[in-house]
Each structure stands twice: as C-alpha cells, then as structure tokens.
Image (cartoon, helix red, strand yellow):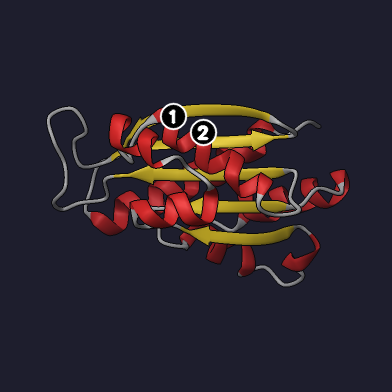
Amino acid sequence: MNQFVTQHLAERLIQLRWMLSTAESCTGGMIASRCTDLAGSSAWFERGFVTYSNLSKSNMLGVPEEMIAHHGAVSEPVAKAMALGAVYRSTALVSVAVTGVAGPSGGSPEKPVGSVWLAWCIDGCVHTELRQFSGDRWQIRVATTECALEGLFKRLPS
C-alpha cells in the first residue's frame, strides 16, 4: 500500500494540531494500522474503533440500533453516525468511518459486494460518499483503506 498519502495526511494533521480517530467495519482495523505504521503517529492518531458487528457499532460508537435495523449497517446514516461517534467518543476533531460489503458473500441486489459507505467528520461537519469497489475481499478492503485516507486528506483545510 502507498504510504505517501498517509505521510502527507500525518503532516497536515500535525500542522493543524488535530487528532484523528477511525471507525471501521469492513476494513477491520486496516485504516488504523496504516496510520500507526508511521513512526510518531501518536502525535496525530488518537484511536481506532473496530466495530464489525452491529452491536459494537451501537455500544462503542452510539449508533442507534433502530437506525441499523431500518437502514442496514451498510448505509449512509450508519456511516455518518459512526464518524460522529468516533469523534464524540474520543478526543479527536477528525474521523473517518467505513462500512461495507467486502465479500465474497453478504451482498444483495441493493448492496452488492464491494459497496462501501465512507464518512469523514472534520471539525463537526460530516461528508459521505458511496463507492463500489471491485476485486476479491482483500482488494476491496485495501481500496477502501486507500479511499478513506485520500478522501480525508483532500477534505482537510490547507
């Protein structure tokens, strides 16, 4: 994986004096791992939440169970709630959240394998994006990780 984006993200967050937290479902901690692969990441990375189950999304991030039941775990409202929960339940000002279907099973006509909702919370404002990645489980998880970090970097103030 390309550490170039992560290095620039780290520099920007340090410059802003902002901390990052992650809320991950389908990536299972890959985003946090990518961040902490860099030496000195404690200067800008606060914590990571791996909330693979629906119960963990509710318990750890405060995502309402009714929201998950109504919209499904792979949805824009849940991704937004995860991003907000990662900020509210940490000392970070910035978060990234991902929830999706990495496969090879679990897809549906409405949410096929490779469907991923990403959400970025930056200083209280949440941005979301639905992406459709292709490939096997590993490739979908790697593509999601890359997209999450690149998306955050692009959305940070200069």
Q: Nearer the viewer, residue 29 or 65?
A: 65
Against 90, residue 117 (above or below) is: above
Q: Residues within 10 Å of mark 2 (few under 14, many from 20)?
A: many
| SS at circle 1 | helix
Image point (43%, 36%), residue name? 78
Image point (21%, 33%), residue name? 111
Q: Nearer the viewer, residue 150 or 110?
A: 110
Q: Residue 123 — which label?
A: none
Residue to which mark 1 is pinned: 77
Image point (70%, 43%), residue name? 94
Give the residue type at disc 2. Lys
Q: Position of residue 47 (x, y in %)?
A: 64, 62
Splitting the image into 4 quarters, where does residue 77 fall?
top left
Q: Nearer the viewer, residue 96 or 91?
A: 91
Against 152, residue 45 (above or below) is: below
Are dots 2 and 1 in contact, CB under 8 Å?
yes
Give the residue type at disc 1. Pro
Q: Position of residue 121 (x, y in %)?
A: 63, 36
Q: Is residue 83 toward the left or the right of residue 25 in the image?
A: right
